């Protein structure tokens, strides 16, 4: 019984770490997009570390919800985020 509780606790801790890493990546990408936008750059290229490859698909989904075109360059491990179609804020 205690082994099950310990395993459950470890699993929840690991899931929490992954969620936190995803949020960090997402916020970092959003900051990079904002910095590029300030410089009138509409396409952002963001390098994904090998250890973060598992987050490419969910990051792509989240960014596409914001009306951004997103592709992943597997050779360079980079997300390419095109914000040219993003509607202007009112």
Image (cartoon, helix red, strand yellow):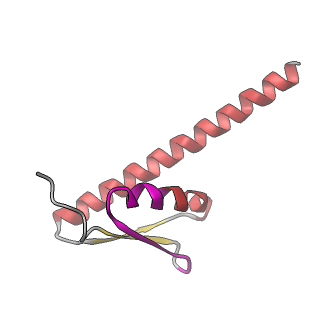
Q: Is residue 73 magenta?
A: yes
Residue 22 vs 61, above or below: the answer is above
The quadrant where residue 50 appears? bottom right
The quadrant where residue 64 appears? bottom left
Measured as percent of width and height from the top left, residue 12 is found at 67, 32
Measured as percent of width and height from the top left, residue 54 is found at 61, 58
Taking the spot 17% from the left edge, 62% from the top edge, the residue there is 38
Q: Nearer the viewer, residue 21 or 81?
A: 81
Relative to 60, 32 lies left or right = left
Q: Quadrant of the N terminus?
A: top right
Taking the spot 38% from the left edge, 49% from the top edge, the residue there is 27
The residue most toward the bottom is 75
Residue 19 vs 66, above or below: the answer is above
Taking the spot 46% from the left edge, 61% from the top edge, the residue there is 60
Find the magenta span and give its range: 59-75
Taking the spot 20% from the left edge, 61% from the top edge, the residue there is 87
The residue most toward the top is 1
């Amino acid at each position: 019984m205690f082994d099950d509780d310990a395993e459950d606790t470890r699993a929840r801790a690991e899931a929490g770490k992954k969620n936190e890493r995803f949020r960090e990546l997402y916020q970092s990408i959003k900051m990079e997009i904002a910095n590029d936008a300030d410089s009138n750059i509409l396409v952002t290229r963001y390098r994904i570390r090998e250890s973060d490859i598992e987050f490419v698909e969910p990051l792509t989904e989240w960014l596409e919800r914001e009306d951004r075109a997103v592709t992943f360059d597997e050779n360079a491990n980079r997300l390419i985020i095109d914000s040219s179609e993003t509607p202007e804020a009112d």
